[in-house]
Image: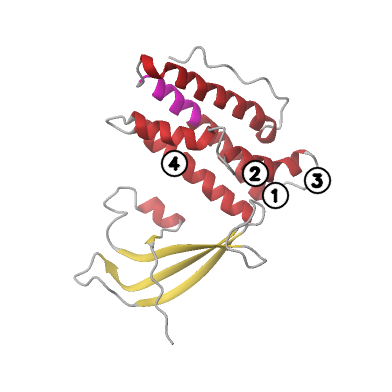
Amino acid sequence: MAYIQVTYVEPYFDTSELQRRLTHFEKSYGLKRFMYATPFTMDGRAHGGLNEQYKRKTILTTERAFPYVKTRISVIEREQLILTPIEVAIEDIQKKTDELKVSTTQEPADAKILQMVIQGCIGTTVNQGPLEVALTFLTPVVEGKEQPTIHHNRIRLCFKEFTRRCAEALKRNKTLIGPDQREYQKELERNFLRFSERIQPLISCKPVRKAKRFENIK
């Protein structure tokens, strides 16, 4: 019995391509490589804890470039990349950072989308969210239980950028809300303050100063 697997793919660009394909048009035309991801753990489960979660990226190369006169084109090459748990975490934080950047700079601004993104990043009810990611992968290094690797340095830098984008998003949101959402804004700022205070010792090699409050956001 034969099976057909139907799955969603997205365009795949390596580092050199991303440097060349800068515009939306360039990222939408002349596409020959596509990617889909499959989560897995070493014990056979699809999903596990943050430090157990691997990801398999399957990259497909087609015979001709899309868009094309035909909607189906033969795949001529297939390769796989395996991401370790910390690499999966780095990719996830980078994605959230990009979402913050897009929703903050979007014109015209969309307060609902912006608030959804902020809530997903620093909301207190977010399970396995950014703070949990930082605690999982950086605490052993801070406590001296693990030697820092290039991936630990990368994730530290990712969290610094992520934290900066969160602050920008909060400032942007404050300019968009009405009187009825002022308390909600304060709650978001409190959440961010708690997040900053907990993550700062993990991403800073210097003595940590208490995070500044947001009363002066304008």
Residue at image point 41% right, 70% down: 60
Q: Residue furthest left?
A: 69
Magenta stretch containing residue 78, yes or no? Answer: no
- Any mark on residue 153, and which? 2
Q: Nearer the viewer, mark 1 or mark 3?
A: 3
Residue type marked 4: Asp
Residue type marked 2: Asn
Q: Nearer the viewer, residue 24 or 121?
A: 121
Q: Residue furthest bottom?
A: 1
Using the numbered discs, state the Cα–Cα distance from disc 2 to disc 4 in whole angstroms: 19 Å
First reached walking from the N terminus: tag 2 or tag 4: 4
Residue at image point 57% right, 53% down: 88
Tell me whether the residue at label 2 lies in contact with that at label 3, contact meaning CB atoms closer than 8 angstroms.
Answer: no
Q: Which residue is mark 4?
A: 98
Residue type marked 3: Lys
Tell me whether the residue at label 1 lies in contact with that at label 2, contact meaning CB atoms closer than 8 angstroms.
Answer: yes
Q: Which residue is mark 1?
A: 149
Kindly state the secondary structure of the residue where label 2 is placed: helix
Q: Which residue is mark 3?
A: 145
Using the numbered discs, state the Cα–Cα distance from disc 1 to disc 2 in whole angstroms: 7 Å
